[in-house]
Image (cartoon, rainbow, N blue to C red):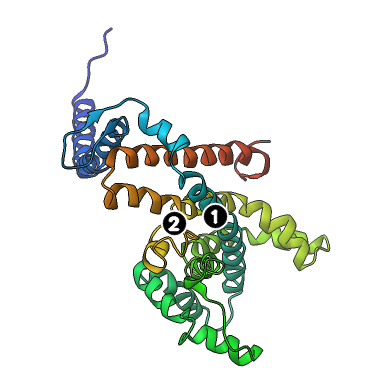
C-alpha cells in the first residue's frame, strides 16, 4: 500500500517552507551587505594588488611587480611589520592578564560591584580618536599632568618626551592601549566565563582540602581556557591592526618610531595614492594574520579544555 501525504503533512511542509522563506528574507539584508561591502571589496583589492592604480588613471595590470617591490624596495615594510609585532607582543599578554584580574575582582560579589563594572568599562566606550587626543594632552612633556607628577616625585627638571620622543612614543601608545583594553570587552568576556564555572567544582575542591590558589589553578583556569583562547585570538588580531592611536597621536613618528603596518598601508593608499601597491600590502597583512590565527587554532588542541568533549 502506497503512503500518500495527508493534509497534515502538506500543511506542515507548507508551514516549514514559509518559515524558511521568511528566514532567508530576514537574512537577505546581511547577505547583501556582506557581498557589497565585504566580499566585493576584498575581491576588488585582490585584483588591484596585481595592477598599478592611482585612482586617476585606470588600473594597469603589472603581474607580481607590487609584491616583489614590497620585499625588495620598500624600506619601511620590514620595520613597520616588526614594530607591529613588538606592539602586539607587549599589549596582548598584559591586556589579557589585566582583564582577567579585573574580572576576578569584579566576580567577588563585593559591595558596589555594579558601579565598578561600569567605571572599568567607560574607557572602552571612549572613541579611539578622542582617547588619543586626551592622552596626547596627558603625555604633553611641558604641561601634561603625567610629567608633572613625575617631576614632583623624582625632583627631575624634565620628564620623558612621550609622543615627541622616538624612545618613548611606543611606550605611550602601549599605556594608552592598556587604559582602554583592560576594562573593555575582554574583561566582560572573562567575567562571563568566570560566572559559568560550576560552584560544585569549587565545593568539591574545598572538600579535598584545596586552598584559594589551588582552586584557581586546577578549577578556574582549565574551565576558562576556551575563554582565554577566544580572547587571545581577538586580542592578537586587534593588536596587529593597530592604527587609530598611532595615526592621531603620533602620525607614525617621531622618526618612524610608531610606523605600524596598518599606518603604512594607509599612507601608501591615501597619501601617495598607490592603491595597487597598498592592496598588495593589505593582502600580505591578511595572510600574516591568517597564519597567526591558524597557528593558534592548531596549538589550542593541546591546552584548551572543553567540558563537553569526550576524552
Left or right: 162 in relation to 211: left
Q: Residue at x 57, y 85 (%)?
A: 158
First in sequence: mark 2 vs mark 1: 1
Residue under the image location 21 percent in, 31 percent down: 17
Determine which of the numbered discs, if any, sits on residue 206 in the image: none
Along the viewing direction, whichever of 69 and 292 lies nearer the viewer: 69
Instruction: Indicate the secondary structure of the residue bearing disc 2.
Output: loop
Q: Position of residue 181 (x, y in %)?
A: 49, 65
Q: Mark 1: few, some, or many residues within 10 Å (few <14, many ≥20)?
A: many
The quarter of the picture where the N terminus appears is top left
Q: CA distance from mark 2 to mark 1?
A: 9 Å
CB-based contact (under 8 Å), mark 2 and mark 1: yes
Q: Name the quadrant of the C terminus.
A: top right
Rendered location of residue 226, percent (x, y): 58, 49
- Please state the horizontal and vertical placement of residue 194, each as a whole percent of the image: 59, 61
User: How many C-alpha atoms fall within 10 Å of the one at disc 2: few (<14), some, or many (≥20)?
Assistant: some
Please determine whether, in this image, residue 72 is positioned above or below residue 110.
Answer: above
Please state the horizontal and vertical placement of residue 115, each as a whole percent of the image.
47, 81
Which residue extends farthest right? 209
Residue 129 image-quadrant placement: bottom left
- Horizontal side of residue 42 vs 283, given as left or right: left
**Residue sitting at x 44%, y 63%:** 253
Q: Is residue 133 above or below residue 15?
A: below
For the residue labelled by badge 1, is the local secondary structure a helix, a strand or a loop?
A: helix
Residue at the image position 62 percent from the left and 58 percent from the top:
198
Query: Which residue in the structure is indicated by mark 2?
Result: 242
Tell me the tag on residue 88: 1
Vertical comparison of 143 with 310: above or below: below
User: Is residue 60 found left or right of 218 in the rendered image?
Assistant: left
Amino acid at each position: 500500500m502506497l503512503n500518500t501525504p495527508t493534509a497534515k503533512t502538506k500543511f506542515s511542509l507548507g508551514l516549514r517552507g514559509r518559515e524558511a522563506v521568511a528566514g532567508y528574507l530576514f537574512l537577505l539584508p546581511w547577505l547583501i551587505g556582506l557581498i557589497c561591502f565585504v566580499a566585493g571589496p576584498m575581491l576588488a583589492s585582490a585584483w588591484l594588488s596585481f595592477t598599478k592604480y592611482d585612482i586617476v588613471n585606470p588600473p594597469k595590470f603589472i603581474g607580481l611587480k607590487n609584491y616583489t617591490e614590497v620585499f625588495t624596495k620598500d624600506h619601511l615594510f620590514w620595520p613597520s611589520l616588526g614594530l607591529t609585532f613588538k606592539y602586539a607582543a607587549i599589549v596582548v599578554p598584559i591586556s589579557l592578564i589585566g582583564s582577567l584580574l579585573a574580572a576576578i575582582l569584579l566576580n567577588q560579589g563585593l559591595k558596589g560591584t555594579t558601579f565598578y563594572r561600569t567605571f572599568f568599562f567607560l574607557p572602552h566606550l571612549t572613541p579611539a580618536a578622542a582617547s588619543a587626543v586626551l592622552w596626547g594632552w596627558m603625555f604633553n612633556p611641558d604641561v601634561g599632568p603625567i610629567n608633572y607628577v613625575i617631576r614632583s616625585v623624582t625632583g627631575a627638571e624634565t620628564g620623558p618626551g612621550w609622543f615627541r620622543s622616538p624612545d618613548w612614543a611606543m611606550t605611550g601608545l602601549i599605556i594608552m592601549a592598556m587604559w582602554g583594553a583592560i576594562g573593555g570587552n575582554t574583561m566582560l568576556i572573562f567575567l562571563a566565563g568566570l560566572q559559568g564555572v560550576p560552584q560544585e567544582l569549587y565545593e568539591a575542591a574545598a572538600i579535598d582540602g584545596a586552598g584559594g590558589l589551588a582552586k584557581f589553578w586546577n578549577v578556574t583556569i582549565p574551565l576558562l581556557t576556551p575563554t582565554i583562547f577566544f580572547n587571545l585570538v581577538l586580542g592578537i588580531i586587534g593588536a596587529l591592526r593597530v592604527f587609530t592611536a598611532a595615526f592621531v597621536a603620533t602620525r607614525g613618528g617621531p622618526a618612524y618610531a610608531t610606523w605600524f603596518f596598518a599606518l603604512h598601508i594607509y599612507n601608501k593608499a591615501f597619501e601617495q595614492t598607490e592603491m595597487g601597491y597598498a592592496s598588495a600590502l593589505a593582502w600580505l597583512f591578511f595572510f600574516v594574520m591568517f597564519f597567526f590565527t591558524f597557528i593558534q587554532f592548531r596549538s589550542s588542541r593541546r591546552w584548551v579544555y572543553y567540558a563537553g568533549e569526550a576524552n
